[in-house]
Image (cartoon, rainbow, N blue to C red):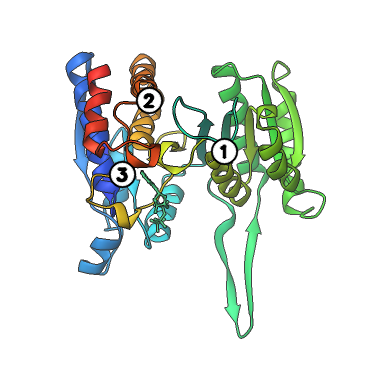
Amino acid sequence: MAKYKIAEIPGDGIGPDVMAAAVKVLETLEETRDLSFEFNRLVVGDELKERTGVALPPGTIDEIRKSDVALFAAVGDTAREVLLPIRQQLDLYVNLRPAKVYPNVPHLKEDVDIVMVRENTEGIYKMIGDRGDGWGINVRVITAKASERIARYAFEYAVKYDRKLVTSVHKSNVLNYSCGVFQEACQRVAEEYPGVEFNEVLVDACAMRLILRPEAFDVIVTTNLFGDILSDEAAGLVGGLGMTPSGNIGDDHAMFEPIHGTAPRLAGTGRANPMATILSAGMMLDWLGEKDSAAVVEKAVIDVLKEAKTLTPDLGGSAKTMDVASAVCEKL
Ligand code: ATP
């Protein structure tokens, strides 16, 4: 039997609510498939900082390192203090965000099935800068090494998941120094994958085309800030925050999380939609190599959505977070 140690990081706000739902789904999988999970619950975030002055206790990253994978829910104001060190110290260089239309989820566009591959360690989020009286500077760092490895991840993903097109998104006509390095790295890597179509789009044109013709995109690879913005745009196209999972992935470690934040007004009310976290748990299983279980989780989510009997208020229903989890578990 495959056994996995999971660092479970619920965080704040609706984080613990949606995490409880995802854990219930994973525990049901243990009963129905040849799998077992050991959860190592780690406390981080806003509430912890209020109590102790520290949002990310020393040792947390080592605990994640000792686990097979991490499942994270949400933190609010301390996101920068918690997420950036985890991503950087574990070298989780890929931020992977699928955006696709699910049944009975109100969406702006049909036929959207995009996978956003965002560079997760450098760019403007390198946090190099300064601020003085009336001025501020953030330095954008782009290296060929990081650009090549994110481009390679995007092409490998396309090959593995039978995707046809990789689009490199940048702004090399204006940000010629930094985006030039990214653009050329993508072009070099593209030559190694003649079986995958490759094209390039400037980030402003991409933002517009995502609204007008999202079906023109398949896999998008881009830099950190552009990916941050475009992946929220893509999430908006397919029905928003309650439905969108993500992964922070490196060569040796990974952490999966819904893209939404703590939604403090919904915390503890049972009105939070757990689907994004359940789908993140599905992505986690896929990364662990449990492809069948990952597919089963996604199918259970789709079945519950199709039935439209157990939906949270954001999807037009009146079900509670844990009712949705139970409905997904029944389908499993
Ligand atoms: P934070 O400061 O942590 O980012 P936030 O409330 O500003 O919190 P989000 O948590 O990302 O930002 O959510 C914005 C809004 O989207 C919420 O107020 C809520 O209405 C809705 N929302 C987000 N996640 C969910 C969810 N899982 N289920 C239902 N509604 C959600």
Q: Is residue 254 visible?
A: no
Residue 202's quadrant in the figure? top right
> Does 13 sit left or right of 143 as displayed?
left
User: Which percent across, then down, holds residue 13?
Assistant: 29, 54
Q: Which residue is mark 2?
A: 305
Could you tell me the amino acid type at mark 3?
A: Ala
Q: Residue at x 52, y 29 (%)?
A: 100
Give the residue furthest to the bottom.
133
Q: Secondary structure at mark 1?
A: helix
Which structural element holds mark 2? helix
Which residue, given by chain and number where applicable, does mark 1 sit on? 237
Side (left or right) of 83 relative to 140: left
Mark nearer the N terminus (2 vs 3): 3
Who is closer to the viewer here, 157 or 207? 207
Dots 2 and 3: beta carbons under 8 Å?
no
**Quadrant of residue 270 within the rendered picture:** top left
Judge from the rendering whether residue 13 lies leftward or rightward of residue 122; answer left or right: left
Which residue is under mark 3?
Answer: 272
Within-10-Å neighbours for mark 3: few <14, some 14–19, many 20+: many
Residue 309: image quadrant is: top left
